[in-house]
Amino acid sequence: MTVSIHITYTPIRDRFDEVLNRVGRYIDADLSNPDRLETRLFTNREDCLIRAYSTWTHLDAFYTFMNAAIDDGAFGNQGDILQHEIEVQIFNPEPIG
């Protein structure tokens, strides 16, 4: 079963590019992961928002990726670069038709 993961990052305005680069670097490094089916990265500089939308083969694969990124210090001390904690939303598929 696939899952859709929506992550919202709210960087401190002066750290926006740094956070965007960090997010992009970790996504790029994991693009060959067969459990990641797709990832899209969106930004809204005016509102200081970064959003990542991805589809995974299963939830455990996503958590493995996130835990490895966190263990690697992806966001170090979040309070220094983010206005709020990272918000993760998980959606399960619904049949259509």
Image (spheres, grey):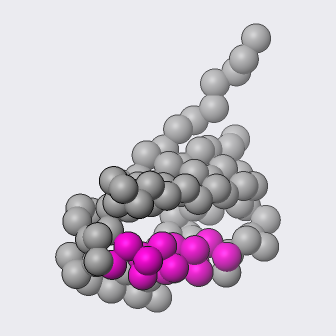
Residue in the image at 67% along x and 81% along y: 29
Residue in the image at 59% along x and 45% along y: 4
Residues 96 and 41: in front is 41
What percent of the width, then of the height, locates residue 79? Answer: 20, 76
In magenta segment, residue 75 = no
Can residue 70 be seen here? The reply is no
Residues 46 and 76: in front is 46
Can residue 90 be seen here? The reply is yes
Q: Quadrant of residue 50?
A: bottom left
The main secondary structure of the magenta stretch is helix
What percent of the width, then of the height, locates residue 63? Answer: 51, 64
What percent of the width, then of the height, locates residue 55? Answer: 66, 50
Residue pushed farthest top? Answer: 97
Residue in the image at 33% along x and 85% along y: 76
**Image side of residue 3 versus residue 19, left or right:** right
- Number of labels in the image equals 0
In magenta segment, residue 23 = yes
Residue in the image at 36% along x and 56% along y: 46
Residue pushed farthest front? Answer: 46
Q: Quadrant of residue 48?
A: bottom left
Q: Is residue 1 above or below residue 95?
A: below
Q: Is residue 92 above or below residue 61?
A: above
Q: Quadrant of the N terminus?
A: top right
**Image side of residue 69 versus residue 54, left or right:** left
**Image side of residue 52 versus residue 58, left or right:** left
Q: Quadrant of the C terminus?
A: top right
Q: Which residues are magenta?
A: 15-28
Q: Is residue 86 above or below residue 20?
A: above
Residues 40 and 65: in front is 40
